[in-house]
Amino acid sequence: MNLNLARILVVEDDEVMRTFVVNSLRRLGLQNIETATDGATALRTMVVFRPDLVLTDIHMQPMNGLDFVQQLRGHANPLVKNMKVIFMSADASPATLNEAMPLGTYGYIVKPPRLDTLKAKIELALK
C-alpha cells in the first residue's frame, strides 16, 4: 500500500501527544488522518472513517486501548476484527507489554514516537 494513501486513526486522550502524533504522520506524507480521544469514540469513528491502521494509546478513560483492541478482536465484522493496530504508550512496563502483545497488534511504540520508528512500524503493518 502507498503510505501516502493510508487512512490512519489516532486514538490518544492527551491533546498535546495527539497533535504531536498527527503532525509526525503528516511529516511522513500521510494526510488521511482521523483522531479519537478514547476507545469508545474510536469504535464509533471506525464505522465512518474505515481506517487501514489504528495507532492507539493504552491508558485512556473511559475505554482504554487494551479494552478497545479486545472489542475489535471480538467484532462480528471481519474488517473490524482484523484491523491492523499499533499500540503507543509511555508505559513500557513488562506487565503492560504482557497484556498488549497477545492482542494481535503490529507493534508497540514508546511515546513520544520517533519519526523513523513510526514510519518503520507503519510500513510493516501496511505491507
Image (spheres, helix red, strand yellow):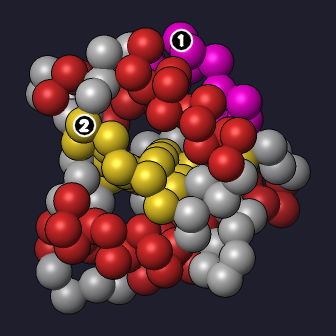
**Residue picked out by circle 2:** 32
- The answer to whether residue 101 shows anywhere in this view is no
Residue type (three-letter) at the residue carrying disc 1 = Asp
- Mark positioned earlier in the residue sequence (1 or 2): 2
In the image, residue 34 sits, relative to residue 4, either above or below, namely below
Residue 116 badge:
1
Taking depth in this image into account, of 116 and 93 the one nearest to the observer is 116
Taking depth in this image into account, of 69 and 102 the one nearest to the observer is 69
Residue 60 included in the magenta stretch of the image: no
Residue 113 included in the magenta stretch of the image: yes
Q: Nearer the viewer, mark 1 or mark 2?
A: 2
- The answer to whether residue 60 shows anywhere in this view is yes
Badge 1 marks a residue whose secondary structure is helix
Badge 2 marks a residue whose secondary structure is strand
Quadrant including the C terminus: top left
The x and y percentages for residue 100 are 63, 61
Count how many numbered circles sit on residues in the image: 2
67 relative to 34 in the view: left or right: right
Residue type (three-letter) at the residue carrying disc 2 = Asn
113 relative to 95 in the view: left or right: left
The x and y percentages for residue 105 are 45, 53
The x and y percentages for residue 124 are 34, 28
Taking depth in this image into account, of 59 and 93 the one nearest to the observer is 59
Instruction: State the image quarter where residue 117 is shown.
Output: top right
Quadrant including the N terminus: top left
Which residues make up the magenta segment?
109-120
Name the residue rendered at 24%, 53% in the picture: 51
Name the residue rendered at 35%, 49% in the picture: 34
